[in-house]
Amino acid sequence: MPIYCLAISQGGNDQHPEDERSRGTDMLRRTHDNEMHLVEASDGGLIYVEVTGTGRPVLLVHGWTMSSAFWVRQKEGLAGEFKVVTMDLRAHGNSSKSLQGHTIPQYARDVRSVIDYLNLEGVVLAGWSLAGPVVLEYWKSYGADRVSALALVEMTPYPMSPKEWNTHALKGHNFDALNEALISLQEDRRAYGAHFVDMMFKTGEGLRKEKDWMVREHLKTPTPAAIAAYSDYVMRDYTEVLGTITVPVLVANGDSEYLAFGARTGQYVADSIPKGYLVIFESSGHMPFYEEADRFNKALGDLLKC
């Protein structure tokens, strides 16, 4: 159990308030353990959401050009004890393919729309990769309202920072590398996606059955939306937000020579947050929640029990 765990009451209820139901569709489909919703964002975009299980809620937000499908092992491992909520960022996954609003602040407003629509209280808000800054923007805008703890998974608060702690490929305001990456993305989207997915694994290569569905999820995001989101993400600096966070924060990083922010970035982030603590997943790359799902679920479950 993290040393910063507090006796946090979940509060609230699990019903949709009438004034918030109008901001989204009625439930699309319910199975014995899964609900699907389309939630209307502040600018009219439709955000695809799934809810699995009951109990203290955790909202899992995926990274750039990924989708809620990547949290499959958290649904399997946590929904027996907690309410697991996943969402597709706008234009990602099953959400509407809007070409507007692909900024970190708008993504944070979309997160708020989901939290309000589901009337979540005491939620643990977790963001992977690009969604780490989304979580920080949420904190900057709304503070601890409706949130009891945060999880920052394989992220950097400032991708272009020149500081020693930063391990991002665009460190030091490397605009040449940024533009080369975006040109490559446009020239051969499928090849770019396949390489990107490979690099997320510890070994730098995913199994064929995993790569196939992950690349398909990557391709669901239209290229213009992907470019807009990535360029906005890498230029934003959230380092000053870290010290303002007053709730417990799990920082979860992988350890790979390919694509992982690792201990250096993770330690900086954890040390900058008053109640932050770092867990390194030595057998993972950029997806510790997937490659070491049992251990990740234990760490997140401990945070949910705070």
Image (spheres, grey):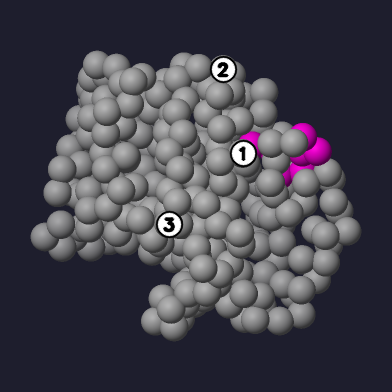
Q: CA distance from mark 3 to mark 2?
A: 31 Å
Residue 4 part of the magenta-drawn span: no
Q: CA distance from mark 3 to mark 1?
A: 16 Å
Q: Main secondary structure of the magenta part?
A: loop
> For numbered disc 3, what is the local secondary structure?
loop
Amino acid carrying label 1: it is Arg
Can you tell which of label 1 and label 2 is closer to the viewer?
1
Give yes or no for contact between labels 3 and 2 (Cβ–Cβ under 8 Å). no
- The residue lying toward the viewer, choosing from 152 and 144, is 152
Q: CA distance from mark 1 to mark 2?
A: 21 Å
Residue 56 showing in the rendered view: yes
Amino acid carrying label 3: it is Ser
Look at 83% across and 44% down and name the residue there.
172
The residue singled out by tag 2 in the image is 244
Look at 22% across and 53% down and name the residue there.
77
In the shown orientation, is residue 249 left or right of residue 257? left
Tell me which corner region of the image, top left, top right, bottom left or bottom right, holds residue 238: top right
Residue 161 part of the magenta-drawn span: yes
Look at 58% across and 23% down and name the residue there.
272
Q: Which mark, residue 121?
A: none
Categorize mark 1 by other alpha carbons within 10 Å: few (<14), some (14-19), many (20+).
Answer: few
Whether residue 80 is situated above or below residue 206 in the rendered picture: above
* Residue 203: percent from left, percent from top: 51, 68
* Magenta stretch, residue numbers: 157-163
In the shown orientation, is residue 4 left or right of residue 230? left
Categorize mark 2 by other alpha carbons within 10 Å: few (<14), some (14-19), many (20+).
Answer: some
Task: Tell me which numbered mark, 3 or 1, is placed earlier along the sequence.
Answer: 1
Look at 74% across and 36% down and name the residue there.
164
Tell me which corner region of the image, top left, top right, bottom left or bottom right, holds residue 48: bottom left
- The residue lying toward the viewer, choosing from 79 and 51, is 79
The residue singled out by tag 3 in the image is 283
The residue singled out by tag 1 in the image is 264
